[in-house]
Amino acid sequence: MTKVLFVCLGNICRSPMAEAIYRAEIAKRKLDWQIDSAATSSWEVGHSAHPGTQKKLRQVGLSSEGLISRQITEADFTKFDWIIGMDESNVENLHGLAPANTTAKIRSYMSVVPGKETEEVPDPYYTVDFEETYQLLQEGIPYWLESISSEK
């Protein structure tokens, strides 16, 4: 089973949206993957997904049920095969939090999207543009599926 963890700062906007999108995509394709999300910070631990994330997911027919913020743990770095941060700050924080025995590959979300490798998924908590976040996450799906599947 392939295990993928999506990470952002608070785990209420970008990473839970990615979790919901990828869970649906994985189910549709009948892949044996486990998808989860987490935060680098403890600020929003225990909170539901942001109302803007919930609204966007509803608009596209996805559920936000069960998307509760949690902070990444040391165990996540060996439990998951891939840990994908939404921006470079997330990735830097992940490298700083990673224990010496880390087995997960830590990457930035847009790093696999041709022509956009250095771009980031902007935080809609600040931009209030949940549509842009959704579109960027959608854009990355085929590239992440290919990248992760090819490295098995």
Image: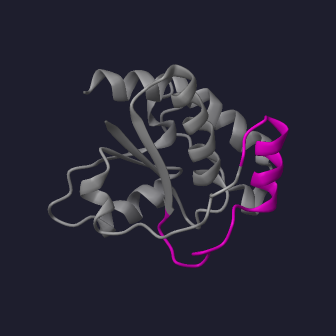
Residue 39 sits above or below residue 128 on the image? below
Regarding residue 115, the answer to whether it shows in the image is no
Task: Give the percent coordinates (x, y) of residue 118.
Answer: 49, 39
- For image coordinates 74% across by 62% down, the residue present is 50
Does residue 127 belong to the magenta stretch? Answer: no
Side of 27 relative to 132 (left or right)? left
Give the magenta part as a residue range. 39-63
**Quadrant assignment for the C terminus:** top left
**For the point 60% across and 75% down, which residue is it?**
46
Q: Nearer the viewer, residue 90 or 70?
A: 70
Q: Main secondary structure of the magenta part?
A: loop
In this rendering, the answer to whether 145 lies above or below 20 is: above
- Residue 149 in view of the camera: yes
Colour scheme of the rendered structure: one colour
Q: Is residue 12 left or right of residue 2?
A: right
- With respect to residue 64, does 45 lie above or below? below
**Quick one: which residue is furthest to the left in this view?**
101
